[in-house]
Amino acid sequence: MEDKVKSGKEILDDFFDGIEEIENVDKDIAKMLSKLYQEDKLTDTNVKNELQKLRDGNKN
């Protein structure tokens, strides 16, 4: 029986594909992180900017 070892990219892909299903995770934040990851734009600056947009959106 051969067990395939997942690459780091495969592990990250699996994580971000299922991030919205993790218990007690904010769905809006999970969607935002997943989208940034899929667009290959997951940087600290982009995350901060998107979080600020979510905060600003909740004020209205």
Image (cartoon, helix red, strand yellow):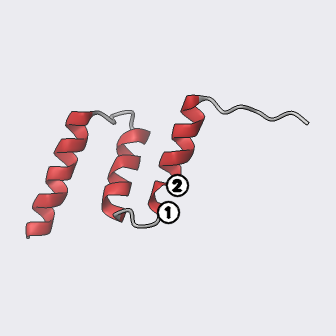
Give the percent coordinates (x, y) of residue 24.
40, 67
Neighbour tally class for label 1: few under 14, some 14-19, many 20 plus, Cα within 10 Å: few
Q: Residue at x 38, y 62 (%)?
A: 25
Identify the secondary structure beneath mark 1: helix
Q: Residue at x 71, y 31 (%)?
A: 5
Residue lying farthest to the right in this orientation: 1
Question: In this figure, which residue is indicated by the disc labeled 2?
Answer: 18
- The image quarter containing residue 3 is top right
Q: Residue at x 15, y 53 (%)?
A: 53
Identify the secondary structure beneath mark 2: loop
Nearest the viewer among 39 and 45 is 45
Q: Classify 56 as above or below 41.
A: below
Nearest the viewer among 50 and 26 is 26
Q: Which mark is residue 21?
A: 1
- The image quarter containing residue 9 is top right
Pointer 1 with pointer 2, Cβ within 8 A: yes
Residue 1 relative to residue 46: left or right: right
- The image quarter containing residue 54 is bottom left
Looking at the rendered image, the quarter that the C terminus falls into is bottom left
